[in-house]
Amino acid sequence: MALIRSWVPGANDAESSFPLNNLPCGVFSCLGEAPRCGVAIGDMIVDMAKLERAGLLHISAEPLFDKPFWNALMAAGPSTWSRMRGRLIELLAEGSAEAREVAPHLVSMNVAQLHLPFRIAEYTDFYAARCHAENVGTMFRGAENALPPNWLHMPIGYNGRASSVVVSGTELRRPWGQVKHPNEITPQFSPSTRFDFELELGAVVGMPSQPGRPVTVEEADAMIFGYVLLNDWSARDIQAWEYQPLGPFQSKATATTISPWIVTRAALEPFRVETPTRQAALLPYLAEPRAMNYDIALEVGLTPQGGTETVICRTNASQLYYSAGQQLAHHTLSGCAMSTGDLLGSGTISGPDKASRGSMLELSWGGTERVMISGGSRSFLEDGDQITLRGRAQGDGYAIGFGDCSGRLLAALTDPYAREDGVYDACRTPRSI
Amino acid sequence: MALIRSWVPGANDAESSFPLNNLPCGVFSCLGEAPRCGVAIGDMIVDMAKLERAGLLHISAEPLFDKPFWNALMAAGPSTWSRMRGRLIELLAEGSAEAREVAPHLVSMNVAQLHLPFRIAEYTDFYAARCHAENVGTMFRGAENALPPNWLHMPIGYNGRASSVVVSGTELRRPWGQVKHPNEITPQFSPSTRFDFELELGAVVGMPSQPGRPVTVEEADAMIFGYVLLNDWSARDIQAWEYQPLGPFQSKATATTISPWIVTRAALEPFRVETPTRQAALLPYLAEPRAMNYDIALEVGLTPQGGTETVICRTNASQLYYSAGQQLAHHTLSGCAMSTGDLLGSGTISGPDKASRGSMLELSWGGTERVMISGGSRSFLEDGDQITLRGRAQGDGYAIGFGDCSGRLLAALTDPYAREDGVYDACRTPRSI
């Protein structure tokens, strides 16, 4: 697949994340305006609400884009997704007869603020990269018991907290929680001192499934609208104390940051690759009808407060042992209904070598080794650290990107129960979380 | 607290679940009508949408009740909840000057269909009854390790699946899943043979909390709108194989049945009792400002297909070691934001004696003992079995009830991947789940 050339500034630049081949979906606003759907192209955002209002789209009788979320378009189904992509390529391609009509509906990325691109219905986090499961398992249970016995037979997942999902750029606060030190008998109430990131890919479910009816891997793949980068922030000290026997809970609920752009499944089609060789045969319901993983180069940058960024991890989405299609098929196995806007985290995408580990827990081997960064070193994250995830699928003369997925960690509140006016007001809007 | 007498038929009957003291919130429809908010009283349902339209309520400038969910009323906040309760007592009390105006807006329960009373935002399930945790722990890990080390220090919880929550009366299908028998090395794909119920109380969160800001137990209590009965159906064989290391997933996702009526916190106020004596001191953030448990008698009936009901469990909500206020406060500890419509399951409410165990797993001690029922016996549930939960807080000459919370288990699909027309249609509405 080669670059599809566009008349939009920046779109044909080999370094751009947003060539015409990509067309990722986000929500944006300019100063004082209401957030609405937009599509990234080159250095610009297509104002989809205005394009629709101008009668240039012809893809739905109902308005789909003058909303602060992509859920309406997603719920309209795969044929509408295809029509949208086809029509946008027509309008934005070099030589388009309608370029002059479209041009007034482009907004410069520099002046736009980006918002959460879709309303998260429910959020599930998987554990689908083998190197990550082995690394964590070795640290927690020893090398012989690294992989749980079920791991090679099913994509292990757990339900996360949708209300914790935020868009790139949202600051987060180091959480308080229950932490038990190994040489103490009872837990302390204290800020987390082992706060971490997790490099993941998130699959965005566009089409719902029926309650009581599991879907095949092929049907699951067709339900997926697109993918985001996802940072599943984790408080390792809280996690270690709370996670037995029912799984991670508050350790994963402070925030989960996603990229501002949903890269559609259609844009990633040329980058499909096979999942890794199976060590144990999978049950037939997990059989993949074709290549279901993606070749997407991933990296993580750490920038200390006032410092410069160091890339601390380089890996690839093809490391996933279970594809998003397999995860989603497994998710419906007991009859669990999926909804438009469900988000499925892949699990931390660590690779086999040291520099490809997708969390501080692994990079610092449980805090026992220092990770060198520009001007210092880290075991876990320090106050003011910013983590930025990047993803790039490299085509022939073009690349598909997600936009930076970043978040800065603020210091813990001095007293999380202090009330400015002595009263807790649930309705007050916070400036950062 | 004594009975508040009402002019509505049946409301003063000592056996009624719905005296004027109760006023629980549900969603109903009659043949061909749209579902809308209603309040149960005696043998009738107050059509809240009609009452509001008739100008009899005076509690909000915005319409709150002509909707198929109670979320709008819940989001309006505690002072609106109080105004609604006060106004309804005024209108429905014996001697009310407005009885003649209200009477045309009452609907007989016999002709109404009940629907899910609120839109579930997210669903969390706790593990807060000590006898249940000890019973299950003993079966899974032996008597010495029955309680996990963290259990006496925090209300253990995990995120469940909101899309699986259904209203009483919805049939469910025995799920397929991965099951590994102890004497085999690899799992099978088969219908669950150890399908179970769990007797729980569910707390319904009315008011949201801010991201990044934990709430105290007192603030948490004030956020709770009311309570439902909750059956957290569980496939024990699927659970045993899948739950390590990240917790229950598909084993709990087939369905979770709730009662059709939300009993408000206000109605339960006279039934507050202290949580049990603490074996270990709790951290200050879990301190309870007053009695936070409720004295609610609970029972479970099992009715085989075509047979008669046997009550197989009698217990009390006061068995919970952690109150819903403590669960909710803990839920926000890491900064996790709560939303209007969040549902918190208490965990299975087993008591200390054999007849008070709230699941088949415990009643049959892991399937090793038969539970006698009218005309037979059970270890786990059989196809056609109906489980009915009931709850009753006994006042002076009146009682507060929830309505039956029941569901019937249908046989597993012969082939869960069979498509009637060869094509999976995610948009087709199922008749049962």
Image (cartoon, coloured by chain):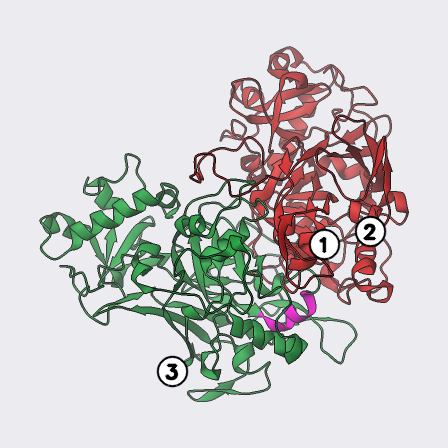
Chain colours: A red, B green
- Secondary structure of the residue carrying numbered label 3: loop
Q: Earlier in the sequence, mark 2 or mark 1?
A: 2
Q: Which residues are magenta?
A: B235-243
- Same chain under badges 3 and 2? The reply is no
Q: Label 1 near label 2: C-beta < 8 Å?
A: yes
Mark 1: amino acid: Gln
Mark 2 lies on residue: A275
- Secondary structure of the residue carrying numbered label 1: helix
- Secondary structure of the residue carrying numbered label 2: loop
Mark 2: amino acid: Thr
Give the side of residue B56 with respect to residue A83, left or right.
left
Residue B96 appears anywhere in the view: yes
Mark 1 lies on residue: A326
Residue A75 located within the stretch drawn in magenta? no
| Number of numbered labels in the structure image | 3
Residue B66 appears anywhere in the view: no
| Of A156 and A67, the residue lying toward us | A156
Q: Chain of mark 1?
A: A
